[in-house]
Amino acid sequence: MQLDPEDQQLATRFPPGFVWGSATSAAQIEGAAQTDGRGPSIWDRFCAEPGRIIDGSNTDIACEHYQRWPEDIAQMRWLGLKAYRFSMAWPRVQPRGRGAWNEAGFGFYDRLIDGLLQAGIQPHLTLYHWDLPAALQDDFGGWQSREIVPLFADYAAEVARRFGDRLASLCTLNEPWCVATLGHETAQFAPGLKDRRVAMQVSHHLLLAHGHAIDAMRAETRTPLGIVLNHTPAYPAQPTEADRLAARLDDGLNVRWYMDPIFMGRYPLDVLAHLGADAPQVHAGDMAAIARPLDFLGLNFYTRSLVSARVPAPAPPGAQGFTDMGWEIVPDVMTEHLARIAREYLPPPIYITENGMANADRLQDGVVDDAPRIAYLRSHLRALARAIQYGVDVRGYFYWSLLDNFEWNSGYAKRFGLFHVNYATQQRIAKASAHWYRALLGRQG
Ligand code: FCB
């Protein structure tokens, strides 16, 4: 594919050494749920409960990446990726979340990491992308209990010891807000609970486990360590005082609730006051344990939220449209938000660890002409280039996702990939957006 002159120019706006990547996660692509001694995860359980997943699907087969990883690395190479972000399934390497390690499970990641390195692609590993060993949920309620903290730190240390020297980065958690709130307050995600007090306690245990895991990994490896947060900046739906306050609180729960403890060692006071009796129990020393120095901050950016004190809230304007998830497309918010985060938190170098769109792709005559995805990519990369120009230290960008995959409670109905996956044959087909991204990466030299 030939880039038009403006896109050629876009390619030159990123600094040398900028890390161009794409991302996936274990539960969403691996399949092989019962293979080589993998233990069940809370998502296996959740999928088995009727009505939880829109299309009634599960992660048993997914994209068969567990078998097809060499082919997938070949596709990454064709794309010209410099980096690949993926996650390790904790129940694959430690089936019960404590006790014996599963060497066959570690063997898979060992081969994958070596395969990436041989292809000249940096491996960026996330320890926890939501697939908790089900045994830990059974034994003590998973993230609801402090018992999880040392277990997660043990797992982190073991992975750092085995793989640290071959990884380009190691990240503790993916999107703790989703784990706490969607998993324990709104019941959209596993384990499917509906209790705000529990959800907030879970958020505290996630942060604490993150901090302890950072310390445990520092003792084992010199590879850069960090966390990945999802930021959906909140804006008032109407220019009223009530909506501004509602937006401030929403932002407090989503952005500041995680950023303040990690980078300032405290929870935001306005959110604590709002939570009242639902605020988490915090032990002496916890906040210092959470606020460990990090080498990088991963941010996942997809959209904003428009918040209103009124119910029902007015629909967002969607001047640039909506994705197939119904998420408003707002690239300018990305620039503005990155500038804010850099100013207010003085974070370590930032990586955009996820950004992308679900699109109602159509495979016709062997081709997926996903023009909306190219437009999304282009507008967000322009927004990112602007943030860098304003002085925000962003070192890399990972498109979500490499492949169409299991989109959590949306099952296989939503397609985010640069590659179309035919789930009947497991054939991968590069979409037009993959050709575009490849052409852009080709200009980087
Ligand atoms: C993020 C998740 C990722 C994917 C995208 C669409 O919240 O980290 O696994 O589902 O959303």
Image (cartoon, rainbow, N blue to C red):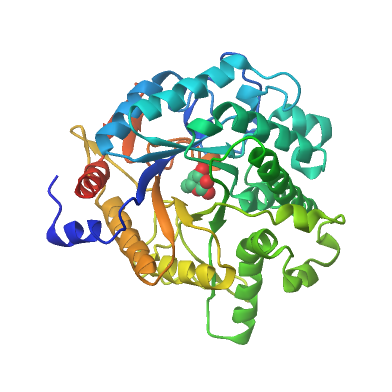
Left or right of 28, for residue 175: right
Task: Determine the image quadrant of residue 394.
Answer: bottom left
Q: Looking at the image, which is closer to me, 180 or 157?
A: 157
**Percent x, y for residue 94?**
67, 23
**Percent x, y for residue 379?**
31, 62
**Residue 356 seen anywhere in this rendered image of the structure:** no
Where is 284 relative to 342, above or below? above
Q: Looking at the image, which is closer to me, 341 or 368?
A: 341
Q: Looking at the image, which is closer to me, 249 or 158?
A: 158
Q: Looking at the image, which is closer to me, 197 or 315?
A: 197
**Percent x, y for residue 290?**
72, 54
Left or right of 124, for residue 104: right
The residue at 68%/22% (across/down) is: 95
The residue at 66%/71% (across/down) is: 249
How many discs mark residues in the rendered view? 0
Task: Determine the image quadrant of residue 112.
Answer: top left
**Residue 291 seen anywhere in this rendered image of the structure:** yes
Where is 91 relative to 266, above or below? above
The residue at 58%/19% (across/down) is: 105
Image quarter of the N terminus: top left
The residue at 70%/61% (across/down) is: 261
**Percent x, y for residue 285?**
83, 55
